[in-house]
Amino acid sequence: MTDRRTELAANLAKVEERITAACVAAGRRREEVTLIVVTKTYPASDVRILSELGVRHVAENRDQDAAPKAAACADLPLEWHFVGQLQTNKVRSVVGYADVVQSVDRSRLVTALSKEAVRAGREVGCLVQVALDAGVGGRGERGGVAPDGIEELAALVAEAPGLRLDGLMTVAPLTGEYAGREQAAFERLMDLSTDLRRAHPAATMVSAGMSADLEQAVAAGATHVRVGTAVLGVRPRLG
């Protein structure tokens, strides 16, 4: 465990250096960017170490991994983000622990989240997931709504009981005009965020960038970066 703590502390320090350098290069203050550590496939013991090292935001993308981990770490001062594609039959469980759901991409999901948030007596933050590889009115390969669908979906979230519209999220697309152009993709997301904030001024969160492209996300103006591998190491293959 001591070795694992040393490993995580070293990795975290390297990521912190990268974020700080990216902020300096972009003329931004370090406080403008929040690190979210994506802990999928890693145990609750790692989450506990990360918390001791000062991490306050953690993310998961599968409810079957997240629910027991969140329960085991319920005593820690953490904010839990759900970042994976979310099926409506998992919403009740996710609402039990997630402070923010970053992958809202369809009206049916908004309805389900609202119902369960009200039932649980919780307010759940929501990000509209934007698919920059989607055609008009379509969805992306990894979930998300096309840019032309943001306004309608954001309005549904903003009006839904128990939900709070926090902003936008994207994953750098693997296909389409932004494939291999991460910074251009993130700059497009920032433009969409500017449009969103005209109608919803409080929806200031922009979640973009992962281990490989966090610098481009910071340069574009992202407020939150989601980093897994660079902090926790390469995930073991399942099976």
Image: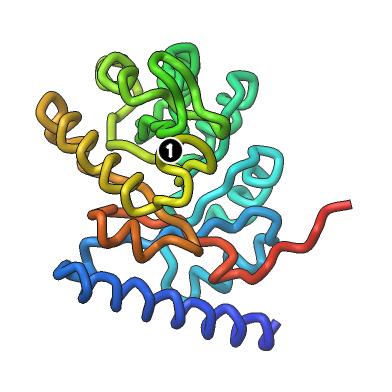
Q: Residue at x 21, y 76 (%)?
A: 24
Percent position of residue 190, x then y = 23, 43
Number of dots carrying numbers:
1
Which residue occupies 59% across, 65% down? 229
What's the amino acid at mark 1? Gln
Q: Is residue 45 left or right of residue 193?
A: right
Q: Quadrant of the N terminus?
A: bottom right
Other residues around mark 1 within 10 Å, as few (<14) / some (14–19) / many (≥20)? many
Q: Please determine whether, in this image, residue 205 is positioned above or below residue 109.
A: below
The image position of residue 219, as x and y in percent, is 26, 61
129 horizontally vs 192: left or right = right
- Relative placement, left or right, of 48 versus 210 is right
As drawn, is 37 to the left or to the right of 238? left
The location of residue 46, given as percent across then percent down, is 63, 68
Residue 208 position in % (x across, y down): 38, 50
Question: Of helix, strand and loop, which one carries label 1?
Answer: strand
Q: Residue furthest right?
A: 239
Return the residue nearer the eye: 55 or 117: 55
Q: Visible in this render: residue 101?
A: no
Q: Which residue is mark 1?
A: 102
Q: Nearer the viewer, residue 99 or 182?
A: 182
Among the 4 quarters of the image, the one containing residue 23: bottom left
From this view, report whether residue 184 is shown above or below residue 95. below
Residue 24 appears in the figure: yes
